[in-house]
Amino acid sequence: MEVISDKKLCLLYVGADQKVVDQFMDCDEKVDFHIVKNSLVALKWLKEHKTADAILCEKEIPGQSGIEFHSVLKEKFSDIHSIPFILIAKDKDKSDLSKAVKNGIDDFYVQPFSTKNILERIQFLKELKANLKKEKIIPAKSKTGKYKIGFWKRSFDIGVASVALLFASPFLLLFIIAIRLESKGKVYYISKRVGTGYKVFDFYKLRSMYPDADKRIKEFEHLNQYAHNENEKDLEHTSAGTQNVKSGGTMLIGDDNTVDEQKHNTRRKESAKNAFIKFDNDPRITKVGKIIRKLSIDELPQLINVLKGDMSIVGNRPLPQYEAEVLTTDEWTDRFNGPAGITGLWQVEARGRSSIMSTEERKNLDLKYVEYANSKRAFLIDMWIVLRTFRAVFQKENV
């Protein structure tokens, strides 16, 4: 068994890209860089040496993809979750990025990249995984299996969504006019959300904020109710896709933008602590927006999502991609193994209390609902949540 020096990082590189090899062999940092050209040799190396500080793997290796190799590792080694796994690609591919996130791969780099920044990222991942291990938060196979919506739930969704849209049409028209009169811009809001099984879809809402709300997250980040440390106001916490950052550092390629890698790592450190964003007395909300949020009228367009099958009436809230990104590893993966919904367990629980719900409480309620959704009592529990939602709508607390 090889003993890793405290002053060196032991890295296992699976691939044959000479440029990557040269980068790490010539870097100023002290690194034990081990090179294997395929998954079979990599498995043999891990069995012999038992440990590594990180695994760097090319997207394409002989015989299989890097994503497939990661799945094999999870089957072969029970403690592989404690080792950061980073995928390296020569070009941007949205489908590969989506698969990597879904399979719990820790990070995805597109060449060229900065060796210094990738080593800093590995150090951060090591610390994060060590802390999760101390708290006994470890990845596990899904307890419930792949979620499939039941006949009664789907029938209820279609029936309620159709009737609600029919009767709500006159009110929707009035509020659409009010929104347009108060502020310029589109009266509806579409964002990419992550739902059941990490499916990404277009999420519909009436616009309750000013048109530039997404770009003002950093300005009001100190108001985030889920922030663990209010003194860390200098950390950037902007939504993915709302801003293009240019600098002299390595650029990470996202779905619709490029982001400076160093700043991205800073955001990821903060995101690991705070998976959710919610502002107290959000100043970005319009006057009409406060009314439609209070009465949950802004949620009505989501009935279209329900009819399309993206969501259900009851389920876990579908998350923006930047929030879902930090919940794709460890035991939080089961959070996405239930239906995405307009209302759910954490919403009715949050409305029924005066104190602010912590991130941990919210995530645990999401996991609890997934267990309910995959049980024989699923439909009855949904009806109970629906009844509590009607009562909660008229309470003062907004969630």
Image (cartoon, rainbow, N blue to C red):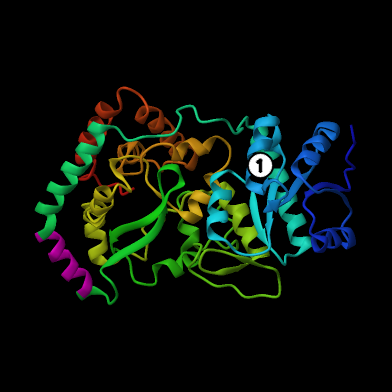
Q: Which residue is mark 1?
A: 70
Is 175 inside the magenta-drawn segment? yes
- Is residue 209 depicted above or below 76 in this figure? below
In the image, what residue type sits under mark 1?
Answer: His
| Quadrant where the image shows the N terminus | top right
Q: Position of residue 99 (x, y in %)?
A: 55, 49
Q: Badge 1 local density, few (<14 within 10 Å), some, or many (20+)?
A: many
Q: Position of residue 16 (x, y in %)?
A: 80, 55
Q: Quadrant of residue 260?
A: bottom right
Determine the main secondary structure of the stretch shown in magenta.
Answer: helix
Residue extending farthest to the top is: 376
Residue 391 appears in view: no
Residue visible at 56% across and 52% down in the picture = 271
Extent of the magenta region: 170-180
Q: Is residue 26 left or right of residue 187?
A: right
Magenta stretch holds residue 34: no
Residue at the image position 31 percent from the left and 49 percent from the top: 398
Near-viewer residue (141 or 189): 141
Q: Name the one closer to the observer, 345 or 34.
A: 34
Q: Measuring 24% from the left and 39% from the top, which residue is drawn there?
A: 389
The x, y position of residue 188, in whole percent, is 27, 65
Compared to residue 136, the image places residue 119 above or below, namely below
Q: Secondary structure at mark 1?
A: helix
Q: How many marks are shown on the rendered structure?
A: 1
